[in-house]
Image (cartoon, rainbow, N blue to C red):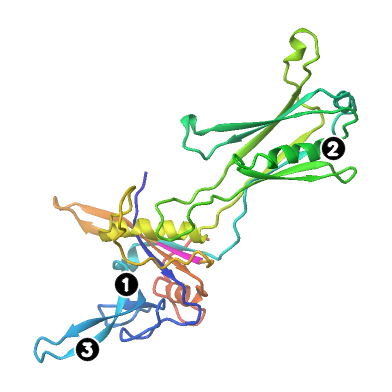
Amino acid sequence: MITYVNTVFVSNDSTSNALASSLASGNKGQFIIWDFDQNKAADNTSARFKIGMFTGKTDKQINPNTGAVTNVANIKWSNFINVADIKGWAVTPYAADTEDAVTIDLHSLDAAVLTEFAKGGKRIIVRLTFKDLPTRFRKWTESYEYITVAGDTKATIATAIANMINKEWKRARVTATATTTSGQEKVVLTAMTYDDDNSVDSINWYNKVRFNVNIYWTDPAGGGFESTNKNFPKGVAITKVPGKTHVGSAKLVRDREAQAMGYEGILNRGEGTWPIIKPAMETDLTKHYNVITIEFENMYRSADDLFRKTKQTVEIYMVGDTDMITDVLGGDGTNPGVAAQIDNTKE
């Protein structure tokens, strides 16, 4: 496993369309990329730089010679980023999350099987296998059983399956929707979202419901072993569309921000810790974030005089446009960027 030292910035500023030009002042959430060696905004002449974000707070600065006190902007800084050690960067515009969805399509159900169902008294079992629970072997199953009634059709079976899943609301982890249009009879099962406490100061971690679906039927009135045989309903099609979680999803950003505080020596995030003593979180669960990830490996000399590299990342989550930062990194088409000479192969 490769472990990175992560610096996470979360900006809710959607009004600043440019980087700050000086260290003196900036809006809360506004970024600055600064070359401390040349004491100026970083450009293509910079050998190394830092990325900073204005926190909206001020600090007292005291002149040791005169004792004069002035207020200076408080800026959260990344570590130094050596231009030659940048491995690449990725920009990911926000896209809405989707959940796992499984369709049980009954419209091609075999006529002979449907005839058996229409006689009534047949057991149809829909088994859901969940793969996101912290159980042994990481799986958990929930089975739903429907007993057919005389005269059942594909439409009535679809409706019955959806109803028997939805009525078990106490153990529900999916929602079911039935389509009864002739020739399009189907049941769509959609994963529910995790219902944690919906706060940024949470000890819950973001997770996603992941599941598969199987369906079979039995004939209790059958003779001998036939009464317990599990038969797949011939002609039924089961298709799954896996859900996707965007890296800028608010709860995922919340977790990244909290975890990155560990690299600042803020470790109070375990179970039973109260009160929670840590800096205020910047993540807003109502926002959607665009993401920039910068990977670099700064070289250093170890105690035994060997050359080592520290894998580090800077993760920037912002509700505003990312061009202001990427234009400095890779250039804006007119001026070369800070790291324009780096072959960035990440999309």
Graded by Cα atoms within 10 Å as few (under 14), some (14 to 19) or many (20 or more), the crowding at tag 2 reads: some
- The amino acid type of the residue labelled 2 equals Thr
Tell me which amino acid carries mark 1. Lys
Q: Is residue 70 left or right of residue 312?
A: left
Instruction: Judge whether 164 appears above or below 9 on screen.
Output: above
Task: Look at mark 1 in the image and give the residue it sits on.
Answer: 76
The main secondary structure of the magenta stretch is strand
Q: Which mark is residue 327?
A: none
Q: Amino acid under label 3?
A: Thr
Judge from the rendering whether residue 111 lies leftward or rightward of residue 3; answer left or right.
right
Q: Which of these two is toward me, 323 or 291?
A: 291
Residue receiving disc 3: 70
Tell me the mark number nearer the camera, choosing from 1 and 3: 3
| Magenta span contains residue 293 | yes
- Percent across and percent down for residue 260 are 35, 58
Q: In the orientation shown, which residue stands out farthest toward the top?
A: 224
For the point 50% across and 73% down, the residue is 322
Q: How far apart are the two marked residues, 3 and 2, measured between alpha carbons?
A: 76 Å
User: Which of 59 and 2 lies nearest the eye of the viewer?
Assistant: 59
- At horizontal 72% and vertical 20% (from top left) the residue drawn is 230
Between disc 3 and disc 2, the foreground one is 2
Magenta stretch bounds? 290-294
Residue 44 visible somewhere in the drawing: no
Q: Residues within 10 Å of mark 1 (few under 14, many from 20)?
A: some
Foreground residue among 335 and 158: 158
Percent of width and height locating residue 334:
50, 82
First in sequence: mark 1 or mark 3?
Answer: 3
Residue under pointer 2: 156
Disc on the earlier residue, 1 or 2: 1
Q: Residue at x 42, y 56 (%)?
A: 255
Q: Position of residue 287 (x, y in %)?
A: 52, 68
Verify CB contact (< 8 Å) between mark 3 and mark 2.
no
